[in-house]
Image: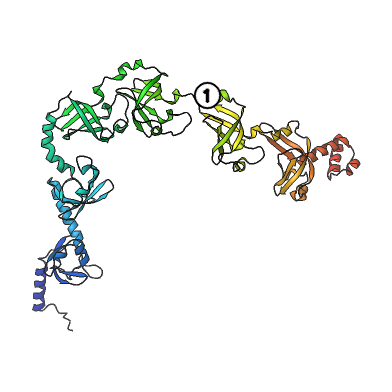
């Protein structure tokens, strides 16, 4: 192979001139869409010829097939590609046909949006909040919100799937590359002229008969009138009573009479009212009295209660908390049905807020008041365990439908309350004592241990510093567990309270079962607290010995190692 280094000869200069003139005609830039001609096809790849490039760009044949370009995979066909890199680190040209298609498609969408032109697409799938629409010309994907599918609610859109149809571009985010379309605008544009003629027929004050409830929103209810126009009844025009949402008053498919209160010929909208068909009941609300019994009609049942009608146009909420004295989270659906007439008591009338509150349970005798009369505090009654949790029992007392509260601390005097709780199960029959009644709060507390003798009464005739005899039950590193004679309660003598001399304060000195004397160091009946000490007993006896024996010699025979020293100190003080 011969290498030419001399570029000064006429032939080399002429070749350089021709080469430069040829390349200058072709403008190749990265990030641009270019046209490539297929000049070779293999099983996996398609090779393109692009004038001005040093090597042939290569495309994956599956990429072209997935784009629907199978019919273009032929020698001599041209394909648009995006030139991503003129030369990578391996010296290869990087191009993409799919990216070129997306860019071209996006340019078409931008043009249609700027010119306010509809585009052809098809709904390919559902997603959260709407559907995905594919642009037929370019394959670009766009979002169709659920509210923009049709001008009326559709329960099923299967008949619209994969059907070519027109869509209006309503939003285009050029930075993020997102597009939002509407089918509803296309449909509405065809109906606009017809709708204008329909709106012309209505005048303020007209009465519309049998309009059908079509749908709800947070601000009102939509009614369909003769299948030709939808009208809005604003939330404030539904009822003279307070309404939080239209579904509290209306059900889809119901028919109601409406009064036309506004007509907007520019926006082609008709506003209506339901409440204005009847006089304002709050004008004569003084006819109703607080705490008085009235018959009301159930007009709608919700999860949180029932809406009842005192009179036509005067609707009030009967909340679930006002249905029963004893049952929690009671369901109005289980107690009433629409159309029932029930007794209620008016508990509140607020003319300014246009609100009336009612209660059904006030028409029934309060079982907590009955309980307080029949079983005052201190009464012992028969009960049945109806429920339990990790710290208490719930006990039903005799024939009354009330669950009383029994805390684990009120189960026993002797054992740990939480451990004792494990011995009880649902259905157990027990006798309990009424400890507390709070009628206003609907709470009753009972106790089991209060029905039995209190072992703490053993200390009633005892006092601090008194000597008692105890039996050692067990020992451990912390001290001694002991039980006084003829007492059912166990107490702990701490290690520090076993002896005056620290060397003797060892729990291991005892094996268990011994009977020893100790002194009461603390006694508190309000807190049910008792502390016992052997050390205190030694100190008391030592003090008595010092007061009884005044010489050092006498002290030598006593079982106290330090007594002689204490006596000597006493003599020194006298001197």
The quarter of the picture where the C terminus appears is top right
Question: On the image, which quarter does residue 468 sit in?
Answer: top right
Q: 60 or 129, which is in the foreground?
A: 129
Residue 466: where, in percent of width, then height?
78, 34
Task: Inspect this view and state whether residue 60 appears.
Answer: no
Which residue in the rendered view is the most extreme toward the bottom? 1
Residue 535: where, in percent of width, then height?
77, 41
Q: How is the image coloured?
A: rainbow
Q: 160 or 528, which is in the foreground?
A: 160
Q: Mark 1 falls on what kind of element?
A: helix
Q: Is residue 247 left or right of residue 446?
A: left
Residue 244: where, in percent of width, then height?
32, 31
| Residue at the (36%, 21%) spot, across then down | 350
Residue 427: where, in percent of width, then height?
56, 39
Q: Is residue 113 left or right of residue 541?
A: left
Residue 197, placed above or below residue 141: above
Question: According to the image, label 1 marks what residue?
Answer: 369
């Amino acid at each position: 192979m011969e290498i030419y280094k001399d570029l000064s000869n006429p032939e080399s200069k002429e070749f350089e001139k021709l080469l430069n003139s040829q390349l200058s005609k072709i403008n190749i830039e990265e990030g641009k869409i270019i046209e490539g001609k297929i000049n070779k096809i293999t099983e996996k790849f398609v090779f393109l010829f692009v004038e001005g490039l040093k090597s042939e760009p290569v495309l994956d044949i599956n990429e072209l097939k997935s784009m629907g370009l199978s019919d273009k995979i032929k020698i001599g066909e041209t394909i648009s590609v995006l030139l991503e890199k003129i030369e990578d680190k391996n010296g290869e040209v990087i191009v993409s046909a799919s990216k070129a298609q997306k860019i071209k498609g996006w340019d078409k969408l931008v043009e249609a949006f700027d010119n306010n032109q509809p585009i052809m697409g098809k709904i390919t799938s559902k997603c959260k909040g709407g559907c995905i629409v594919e642009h037929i010309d370019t394959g670009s994907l766009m979002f169709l919100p659920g509210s923009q599918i049709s001008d009326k609610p559709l329960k099923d859109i299967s008949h619209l799937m994969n059907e070519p149809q027109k869509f209006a571009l309503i939003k285009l985010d050029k930075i993020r590359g997102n597009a939002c379309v509407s089918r509803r605008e296309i449909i509405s544009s065809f109906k606009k002229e017809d709708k204008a003629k329909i709106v012309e027929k209505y005048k303020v004050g007209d009465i519309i008969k049998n309009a059908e409830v079509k749908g709800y929103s947070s601000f009102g209810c939509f009614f369909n009138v003769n299948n030709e126009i939808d009208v809005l009844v604003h939330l404030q025009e539904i009822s003279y009573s307070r309404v939080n949402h239209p579904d509290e008053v209306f059900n889809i498919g119901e028919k109601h009479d409406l009064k036309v209160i506004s007509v907007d010929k520019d926006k082609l909208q008709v506003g209506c009212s339901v409440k204005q068909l009847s006089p304002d009941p709050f004008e004569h609300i003084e006819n109703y009295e607080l705490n008085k019994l009235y018959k009301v009609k159930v007009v709608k049942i919700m999860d949180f209660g029932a809406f009842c009608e005192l009179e036509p146009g005067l609707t009030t909420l009967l909340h679930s908390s006002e249905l029963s004295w004893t049952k929690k989270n009671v369901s109005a659906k289980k107690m009433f049905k629409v159309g029932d007439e029930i007794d209620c008591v008016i508990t509140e009338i607020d003319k300014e807020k246009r609100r009336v509150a009612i209660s059904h349970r006030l028409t029934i005798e309060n079982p907590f008041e009955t309980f307080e009369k029949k079983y005052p505090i201190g009464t012992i009654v028969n009960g049945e365990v109806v429920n339990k949790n990790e710290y208490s029992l719930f006990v039903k007392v005799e024939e009354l439908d009330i669950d009383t509260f029994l805390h684990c601390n009120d189960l026993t005097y002797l054992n740990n309350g939480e451990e004792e709780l494990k011995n009880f199960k649902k259905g157990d029959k027990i006798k309990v004592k009424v400890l507390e009644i709070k009628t206003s709060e609907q709470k009753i507390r009972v106790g089991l241990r209060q029905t039995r003798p209190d072992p703490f009464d053993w200390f009633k005739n005892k006092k601090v510093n008194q000597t008692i005899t105890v039996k050692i039950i067990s020992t451990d590193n912390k001290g001694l567990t002991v039980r006084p004679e003829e007492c059912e309660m166990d107490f702990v003598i701490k290690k520090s309270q076993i002896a005056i001399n620290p060397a003797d304060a060892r729990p291991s000195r005892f094996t268990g079962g011994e009977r020893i004397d100790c002194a009461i160091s603390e006694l508190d009946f309000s807190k049910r607290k008792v502390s016992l000490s052997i050390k205190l007993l030694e100190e008391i006896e030592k003090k008595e010995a010092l007061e009884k024996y005044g010489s050092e010699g006498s002290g030598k025979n006593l079982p106290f190692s330090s007594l002689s020293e204490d006596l000597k100190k006493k003599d020194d003080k006298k001197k």
